[in-house]
Image (cartoon, rainbow, N blue to C red):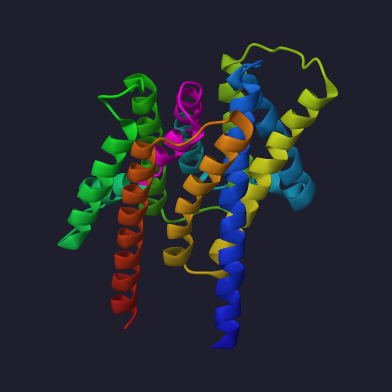
Amino acid sequence: MSHFADRKYFGIFFACASYGIYSLHFATVKWLTAEHSLWQLVFMRSVVMCLITLAVSGRGTVSAAINSPYRLSTLFRGVLQFVAMACFFLAARDMSLSAVMTLYCTAPLIIVVLSIFILGESVHGYRWLAVMVGVSGSVIAANPGGAINPAPALLALSSAFFWALAVIFTRKNSATDSTPVQLLVTGVVFIVLSGALMTWETPSTLLQWGLMVALGLQIYLAQYFFFEACRFAPASLVGPLEYTSVGWSCLLGYLIFSDIPTPHIIIGAVLVSASGIVLAMSARGKASERAA
């Protein structure tokens, strides 16, 4: 029992570290987009991430990716992730980091709805109530009657939608490649798509070069810690911890951009987070029942 508890604590640590680094990554990109093309930043981070993946995993990863029977599904999932990422960062140009993250965190609610139509799963009782509470929170956070431009709010929600599609697609096609192969293939997809869209502007200072390289290290560490979290703790515990990203985003937004979350963002974040945690806990309960 003690060993199992220790593993869960490791999982919690890795999950919180992952979501914290993701938030730092988002803040770094938002800061650099003031002087550089978003697509150039994505291109640079993806190149660095692929190089780190190859350095850590070895050359066999390339042949494994080329010969994988699941390469097409992995490529398609990479495209969905790219679109989700693009919508997120485009929204972040005109919204505070805390607002974008709050709307992005509606992804678990969208997954519940999509699972009905795509996976044929059933949703009953208080899970629907949790979804409605989460939708209400996203509406409050978007503040359609206030000062927030509806266009970036829709982009943030689109980011959540495409990420939810990527998760649903992963569930539907449960056979997956190894972690290094998935990281490499996803990185290549990001390199190709961002390279086609970018206009290159040579960084003028060593600090800018360093931050661009840091983007690749950040995204690699964030994904590595996430996979480690899933190895040490059940998904039902790791999933709800994603809502710590809202707190990280509020803190980093204040420290870097002097953004102070407005009351409607705070209220919306609380409702979205609470509904997501309820859904995750109910999924955990159903899993326990099946196991019994």
129 left or right of 193 in image: left
Residue 205 spot, x, y in % from top left: 82, 19
At horizontal 59% and vertical 49% (from top left) the residue drawn is 20
Camera-side residue: 12 or 198? 12
Q: Specify whether residue 191 is in view.
A: no
Quadrant where the image shows the C terminus: bottom left
Residue found at the very far bottom of the displayed protein: 1
Identified at 68% across, 42% down, the residue is: 218
- The residue sitting at 55% across, 46% down in the picture is 248
Residue drawn at point x = 28 percent, y = 37 percent: 140
Give above or below for 77 relative to 127: above
Task: Tell me: residue 1, above or below residue 281.
Answer: below
Residue furthest right as drawn: 206
Q: Position of residue 212 (x, y in %)?
A: 73, 29
Q: What stretch is highlighted in magenta?
A: 85-107
Q: Viewer-proximal residue, 209 or 291?
A: 209
Q: Where is residue 220 in the image (x, y as percent from the top left)?
A: 67, 45
Say whether residue 259 is left or right of residue 24. Answer: left
Q: Is residue 269 visible?
A: yes
Residue 122 vs 159, above or below: the answer is below
Magenta span dominant secondary structure: helix
Tell me the quarter of the image containing the N terminus: bottom right
Residue situated in front as seen by the camera: 195 or 144 = 144
Residue lying furthest left in this view? 125
Residue 201 spot, x, y in % from top left: 71, 12
Q: Does the magenta stretch include residue 210?
A: no
Q: In which quarter of the image is residue 22?
A: top right
| Residue 93 lies within the magenta run | yes
